[in-house]
Amino acid sequence: MRTSEIASLPVVTLAGDDVAQVKDVVFSADGGAVAGFTLAGRGLLSGPLKQGLSWSNVVGLGPDAVMIADDGALEPVDTVVAAAASSSAGAGSGGNVLGDRVLTDTGSDLGKVSDVVIEYDNADGGPCDVVGYEIEASDALKASSSKGNKHTRLLLPLPDTLAVSSEHVMVPSSAEGFVSDDLAGFGAAVQAFRTQLRGGS
Amino acid sequence: MQWWGWVIVALVVVVAVAAALVAVQAKRRRGGVIVGGPGPADAAGPTDTSGGLP
C-alpha cells in the first residue's frame, strides 16, 4: 500500500464515529516502521488538528478507513512525533520525505522520493513496516535499469532499518538491483533484497 | 465608472479572495510523510570503506 492512499482516509471509531482524517504519515527513521499519523479535521474548512494517532492505537488499517477503538486513542501530535524520535538524536525530525533525493552508500543519486510503500497485515496486528520508496528515477538509474527505460517511476526496496535526514534518504547500493515497476511483485523483491542483506552481513 | 462597473470589480475581488482561501486551505490539509527523527546510521557517520588504509 502506498502512503498516498492513506492520506485523507477517515479515522473512524469502532462505534462508527468519524473523528478525523489522516494528514501526514509519521515514521521513525531508525526503525523503518510507521509510528503514527498527524490528523486534520473532517470539515472542508477545518485545518490540522493538535491531536495525532500513534500506530499502537490503530485497531485496523484498510483501503477506506483507519479504525480506532474510541476517540481516547488520539493523543497530542507532539507526543506522536516525539515518540518516533525518542530512540534517536532528534536533529532533522519533522522533515517531509517526499521530494528527498535518494542516495546510495556509494554516492549514486537514484532519484527523488514520490511516495512511500508500506506493508501491514491486519491479521497479526504487528508493526506497519516501511518496505520501499516509489521514486522518480534519475537518468543514471534509468540508464542502468532495463525497467527504467519505460517507467520513470520505480519502486525501490528498503532494508529493515533506514537512514533519513531532512534532505536525503540513504539506501544500500545493492538496492539498485532490486528495483521494480510493479507493486504486485514488489513484496518478493523486498524479501529477496532483505535476504541478500542478511546473508551478506 | 458606471455602477455596474463597481459591481463587477467587487465580484472579481470576492472570487479572487475565495480562490486564495481555497488554495491556502488545500495547502494546510495537504499530507506528507514526515520523519520522527534520524536513524542511528545518521548519528554513526559515514561507513568506512577504505579497507583500513590511512
Image (cartoon, grey):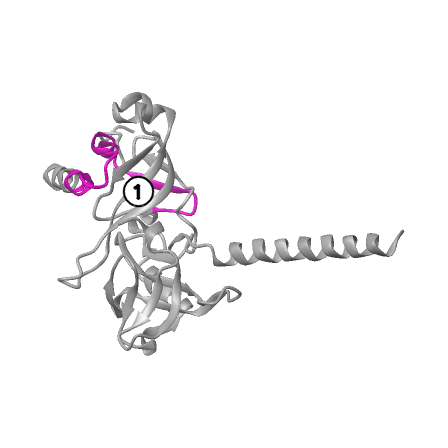
Q: Is residue A89 at least partly visible in the picture? A: no
Number of on-image labels: 1
Depicted B39 relative to depicted A112: above or below: below
Depicted A86 relative to depicted A199: above or below: below
Q: State the residue position of label 1.
A: A133
Is A109 in the magenta?
no
Residue A70, percent across and down? Answer: 30, 77
Q: What's the magenta region?
A: A164-190
Q: Is residue A6 at least partly visible in the picture? A: yes
Mark 1 residue type: Tyr
Residue B31, percent across and down? Answer: 43, 54
Q: Is residue B19 left or right of residue A46?
A: right
Residue A146, percent across and down? Answer: 25, 23
Q: Nearer the viewer, residue A118 or A17?
A: A17
Callout 1 environment at 10 Å: few (<14), some (14 to 19), or many (20+)? many
- Mark 1, secondary structure of its residue: strand
Is A186 in the magenta?
yes
Question: At 21% from the left edge and 30% from the top edge, which residue is drawn?
Answer: A177
